[in-house]
Image (cartoon, rainbow, N blue to C red):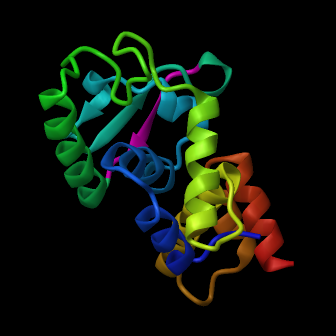
Amino acid sequence: MVLSRDEVARLLNATTCLKHQAALSGAYGAGLRVAEVSMLKVADVDSERMLLRVVRGKGGRYRNAMLSEDLLTLLRQWWRVGAAAGMHRDGWLFPGQHAMKPISTRQLYRIVIEAAQAADSPSGWRRTRCAFLKKRLADRRSRCSLNQNADHVADTVDSAAERYILHRTLM
């Protein structure tokens, strides 16, 4: 089951603080995995090119993720609050209990579970990421003309996860 836009909005609004909302929004808005959100540094936000640099992605690979205006605005709000609380410019974007360590993946999972319970929504980290991929795939599909078939759409899909969602939605 993939979350709808309304369910994602309810999940994000059910978070208990700005830090949690910014972390979950990063997962949904940029399609990041839980470990990728955890390992983001403040310097990884590239507001000029509207990208998030993911240095420690799956398989230890470097990649860039899209950064929307809404997500950038939310991250800037979080930066103001975090900087006032002592967050460092070259530190973690989402510090853990100690400022020198990132938030743990376990804590991020807990945040999703608590927000899902508060929003009365069956959710998890993977569903949030899949909702992003489905949204991205729908955006791509809408750009293709109605006369083109699904094979052409599949040629434009970047990742295995997007191909899986495409296969599930077309079959």
Residue under the image location 43 percent in, 13 percent down: 101
Quarter holding residue 168 = bottom right
Q: Is residue 86 left or right of residue 129?
A: left
User: Which residue is at a point 38% across and 24% down the rendered structure image?
Assistant: 95
Q: Is residue 56 magenta?
A: no
Identify the residue shown where x is 61% and y is 17%: 60
User: Any magenta on residue 65?
Assistant: yes
Q: Position of residue 68 (x, y in %)?
A: 30, 56
> Where residue 20 sits: x, y (%)?
42, 46
- Where residue 8 sits: x, y (%)? 52, 69
Q: Would you place residue 3 above or below residue 19 in this image?
A: below
In front here: 100 or 37? 100
How many labels sit on residues?
0
- Toward the top, the furthest residue is 100
- Which image quarter holds the C terminus? bottom right
Give the magenta range: 61-67
Given residues 122 and 157, the one toward you in this image is: 122
Would you say residue 157 is visible in this rendering?
no
Residue most toward the right? 171
- In which quarter of the view is residue 45 placed? top left
Left or right: where 108 falls relative to 163 = left
- For residue 79, side relative to residue 128 (left or right): left
User: Which quadrant: the N terminus?
Assistant: bottom right
List x then y, in percent, for residue 49: 22, 40
Farthest residue, direction bottom: 146
Along the line of sight, which residue is nearer the eye, 19 or 141?
Answer: 19
The residue sitting at 44% across, 57% down in the picture is 15
Residue 22 appears in view? yes
